[in-house]
């Protein structure tokens, strides 16, 4: 650690500090409640921003000191479940709004005052079972680890959707 601070002038952990952003629906709040300790232990975020419906706040309050709850319908001006539903239904005939709304929320977070530095969007139902680093030892490059699993039904569905040969 001493060599690190001599070379870079700060604590090694400072290079990995980032926030976590999680969008969660009511159905996954109970799972997320159990997942937050794993996220804190193995990802070591400065803040965990949970974007959810205001009525879900009581399910998640007090889990961790670094947990910040954000109302999904007040995160970005003009972005709400109702607004996304209206556009999807009138222009695309789509009634299933939740997944699309969540994607807009993830992108919209970058426009808020909460996005002060680097952050990682994390799925509420993904448990980090081991410590994960997302940068190299110099804290410069992001590291991505390709999956080695192969679930045939998943890839078959993707092939059918995109009409792959």
Image: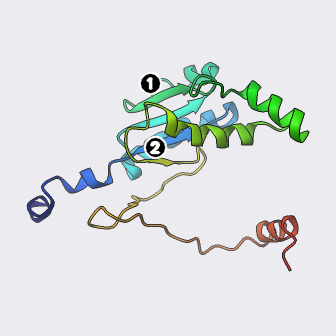
Q: Would residue 4 appear left or right of 146 to someone viewing this image?
A: left
Left/right placement of residue 164 relative to residue 84 reads right
The span from disc 1 to disc 2 (Cα, nearest Å) is 17 Å
Say what secondary structure mark 2 lies in. strand
**Earlier sequence position, callout 1 versus callout 2:** 2
Q: Nearer the viewer, residue 57 or 19?
A: 19
Q: Position of residue 140 (x, y in %)?
A: 32, 63
**Badge 2: residue crowd in 10 Å (few <14, some 14–19, many ≥20):** many
Q: Secondary structure at mark 1?
A: loop
Residue nearest the viewer, comparing 121 with 130: 121
Q: Hey, which quadrant is residue 28 in on the image?
A: top right
**Residue 24 falls left or right of residue 48:** right
Evaluate if marks 1 and 2 touch, with contact meaning CB atoms under 8 Å apart. Answer: no
Residue at image coords 68%, 26%: 80
Residue 20 percent coordinates (x, y) = 46, 43
Residue 107 image position (x, y, % from top left): 58, 42
Is residue 140 positioned above or below 124 on the image? below
- The spot of residue 139 in percent (x, y) is 29, 61
Inspect this view and state whether residue 152 appears. yes
Image quadrant in which the C terminus is located:
bottom right
From the image, state whether disc 1 or disc 2 is nearer to you: 2
Q: Is residue 76 above or below residue 35?
A: above
- Read off the residue under disc 2: 20
Task: Give the residue furthest to the right.
Answer: 93
Residue depicted at 61% across the width and 23% down the height? 56
Visual colour scheme: rainbow
The local crowd at label 1, few if under 14, some if 14 to 19, many if 20 or more residues have their Cα within 10 Å, is few
Which residue, given by chain and number where applicable, does mark 1 sit on? Answer: 62
Instruction: Give the residue at x 74% y 37%.
Output: 98
């Amino acid at each position: 650690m001493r060599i690190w601070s001599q070379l870079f002038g700060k604590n090694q952990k400072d290079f990995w500090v980032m926030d976590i952003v999680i969008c969660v629906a009511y159905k996954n709040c109970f799972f997320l409640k159990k997942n937050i300790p794993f996220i804190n232990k193995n990802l070591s975020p400065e803040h965990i921003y949970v974007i959810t419906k205001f009525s879900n706040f009581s399910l998640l309050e007090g889990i961790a000191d670094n947990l910040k709850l954000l109302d999904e319908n007040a995160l970005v001006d003009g972005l709400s479940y109702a607004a996304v539903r209206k556009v999807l239904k009138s222009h695309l005939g789509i009634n299933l709004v939740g997944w699309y709304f969540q994607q807009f929320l993830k992108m919209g977070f970058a426009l808020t005052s909460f996005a002060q530095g680097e952050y990682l969007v994390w799925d509420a139902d993904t448990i980090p079972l081991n410590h994960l680093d997302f940068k190299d030892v110099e804290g410069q490059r992001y590291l991505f680890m390709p999956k080695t699993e192969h679930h045939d039904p998943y890839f078959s569905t993707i092939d059918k959707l995109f009409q792959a040969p």
